[in-house]
Image (cartoon, coloured by chain):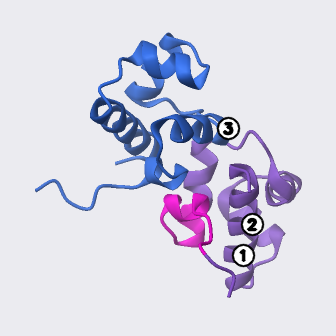
Chain colours: A blue, B purple
């Protein structure tokens, strides 16, 4: 799985855990909903700045968003 | 410590562990030496693509580059 897919998957998972809509997370992280939607589909060019802002709002360490899941069991 | 500082610090540390010059790592990761130099000083706009490429060459998980050191002892 490529890194941007990993990021996209983690982003969707962590947002769903919090039961936030894309609109809610986008508002909190001060990005547009359509940009968040693209990120969750796997965008190439997300910057470290946006990674940091999303992690902050999702209340996880930024590294968490890049972590590959070690299993799916 | 801001996320880009964390990234910059980890990048320098991991490169030094491997005893690579900036030129060597830049060449391997297919970025310019001057851009790598900026990244190691703490650049704002490093993308997930570059994070992935550097991690690959440094032989670490991408998440490793965003991890805050928990202690300095």
Q: Chain of mark 3?
A: A
Does A21 appear above or below A68? above
Q: CA distance from mark 2 to mark 1?
A: 6 Å
Asked if the stretch drawn in magenta spans residue B69, the answer is yes
Let me know if marks 3 and 1 both belong to one chain.
no
| Label number found at residue A25 | none
Name the disc covering residue A49, or none.
3
| Alpha carbons under labels 3 and 2: distance apart | 16 Å
Count up the numbered dots: 3
Please say if B41 is above or below B73: above
Q: Tell me how far mark 3 sits from mark 1, CA to CA.
A: 21 Å
Q: Is residue B40 above or below residue B58?
A: above
- Which residue does the image show at 51% across and 55% down from the upper left? A63
Which residue: 61% across, 20% down?
A30
Task: Please tell me how crowded label 1 is: few (under 14), some (14-19), or many (20+) other residues with Cα within 10 Å.
Answer: some
Residue A41 relative to residue B15: left or right: left
**Residue A69 in the figure: left or right of residue A25:** left
The percent position of residue A54, horizontal first and vertical second, equals 53, 35
Residue A60: x and y in percent read 47, 48
Element on which disc 1 rests = helix
Q: Are marks 2 and 1 in contact (CB under 8 Å)?
A: yes
Q: Which residue is mark 1?
A: B13
Chain letter for mark 2, please: B
* Residue at numbered disc 2: B9
Magenta range = B55-70
In terms of depth relative to the viewer, which is nearer, A13 or B25? A13
């Amino acid at each position: 799985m490529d890194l941007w897919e990993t990021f996209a998957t983690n982003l969707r998972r962590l947002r769903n855990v919090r039961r936030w809509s894309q609109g809610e997370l986008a508002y909190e992280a001060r990005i547009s909903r359509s940009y968040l939607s693209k990120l969750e589909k796997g965008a190439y060019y997300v910057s470290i700045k946006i990674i940091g802002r999303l992690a902050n709002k999702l209340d996880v360490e930024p590294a968490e968003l890049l972590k590959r899941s070690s299993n799916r069991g």
